[in-house]
Amino acid sequence: MAAFSLSRLRFQSCFILLLSITFIVPVMIYVFGIRSEPSTVWFHNFAKLIRFQRVRKHTLINMTCLTRHNMTDRLSMESMTAVPVREASSICYHEAHPHNYRFIIDEPHKYEQENLFLVLMVPVAPHELEARNAIRSTWGNESVVQNKTIMVIFSLGLPGIEAEKQQEELRLESQQYHDLVQSDFIDSYLNLTIKTMVIMDWLATHCPQASYAMKIDSDMFLNLENLMSLLLRPDTPKENYMTGKVMWNIPVIRDKNSKWYVPKELYAEDYYPTYLLGMGYVFSNDLSEKIVEVSKEIKPFNIEDAYVGACLKRIGISPSTPPNPSQFKDYFSGKYKREEFASVITTILNSPQQLITFWQDLKRPT
């Protein structure tokens, strides 16, 4: 009996020792691992950990994967934005509302102009420097048109690949041009709804004094003279107004292999509400706050322009058909015609170099 008690005591001692080693060794590795990092890196990681614990209250979309094979994107999103994941059959998506995101890069003084008339918000990927520079040297360089002040802001999220290097490049670019606004969501095609709603939130909170705003893609040609002529028409509404290329009776795509697939769990109707094609639409700036507020009541889905249309429908506003619908073109024939580009408001292009070439020709003396 004594031998049994002694053996039992030895077993308990060994177990406690083994348990202590199991606990202490990882802690020592963790502690020394932290000490081996620069203090700024440790602080950044700690801050990221704190952000991961935040509880998200409101629901707007941060679409990260539609099928299981997109698990890489899902993990990347979870680690960078820390938004709780819900699953609906084969879909996994993140809940998010614009106020859940903070601005990493911002321009706290640029939007303080009291006479600001039009803000051009350009969603662009972090790596698309060539597109940003092409805009800066063409229509983005026009700060006053028809005696009205215009401001251009590039909106972007977090880089996914080579994040540290790209983030530093963005910081230097911001210091040089002062036209970047970056928020802490992963920048991807499936997150365009998040990007659009962050744009709306930025306009509502940072530029409420602007009369109009435009969301315009980075691959677009924009004729500001024609746009300003439209906005300055006596019959153009100053409130509850949004116009562009109007889309009616567009069916929801249920094919899982499609880039535009939306499952019934996210949007149950077979057709989208009337909306404006996301390549470029202009609106009275009072709508920014209204869209953000009503979005809290609308289940999000990943087709950003149709989602804005759903917000407008809930508000009770219909998109306006422009006086000349042909001025908002959603295609480029591949052939440059000077008279055509002189008459449009927007046209999609194939490359940044095309924008520069066509712009230079359009502006040359005749």
Image (cartoon, grey):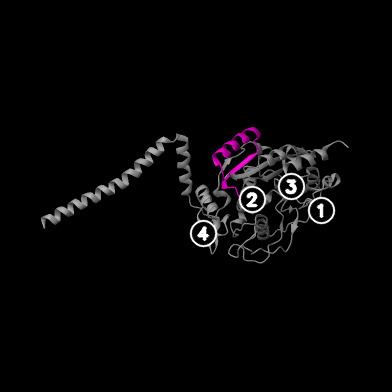
In space, the residues marked 2 and 1 are separated at their CA atoms by: 25 Å
Three-letter amino acid code of the residue under disc 3: Asn
**x, y percent for residue 352:** 72, 42
**Eyeballing the image, is 273 above or below 344?**
below
Three-letter amino acid code of the residue under disc 1: Ser
Give the residue at x 14% y 53%.
6
Q: From this viewpoint, is residue 115 visible?
A: no
Question: Range of the magenta residues?
Answer: 160-188
In space, the residues marked 4 and 3 are separated at their CA atoms by: 37 Å
Front of the two marks 2 and 4: 4
Helix, strand or loop at mark 4 = strand
Side of 32 relative to 85 (left or right): left
**x, y percent for residue 2:** 11, 55
Along the polypeptide, which appears first: circle 3 or circle 2? Answer: 2
Q: Report which residue position mark 1 lands on.
A: 326
Query: What's the mark number on residue 196?
Result: 2
Give the residue at x 71% y 60%.
274
For disc 4, the neighbor class at 10 Å (few under 14, some 14 to 19, many from 20) is: few
Three-letter amino acid code of the residue under disc 4: Arg
Along the polypeptide, which appears first: circle 1 or circle 4? Answer: 4
In space, the residues marked 2 and 4 are separated at their CA atoms by: 21 Å
Three-letter amino acid code of the residue under disc 2: Thr
Q: Are marks 2 and 1 in contact (CB under 8 Å)?
A: no
Q: Report which residue position mark 3 lands on.
A: 350
Helix, strand or loop at mark 1 = helix
Side of 70 relative to 25 (left or right): right
**x, y percent for residue 100:** 54, 49
Q: Quadrant of the C terminus?
A: top right
- Identify which residue, 188 or 225, lies in the foreground: 188
For disc 3, the neighbor class at 10 Å (few under 14, some 14 to 19, many from 20) is: few
Q: Report which residue position mark 4 lands on.
A: 86
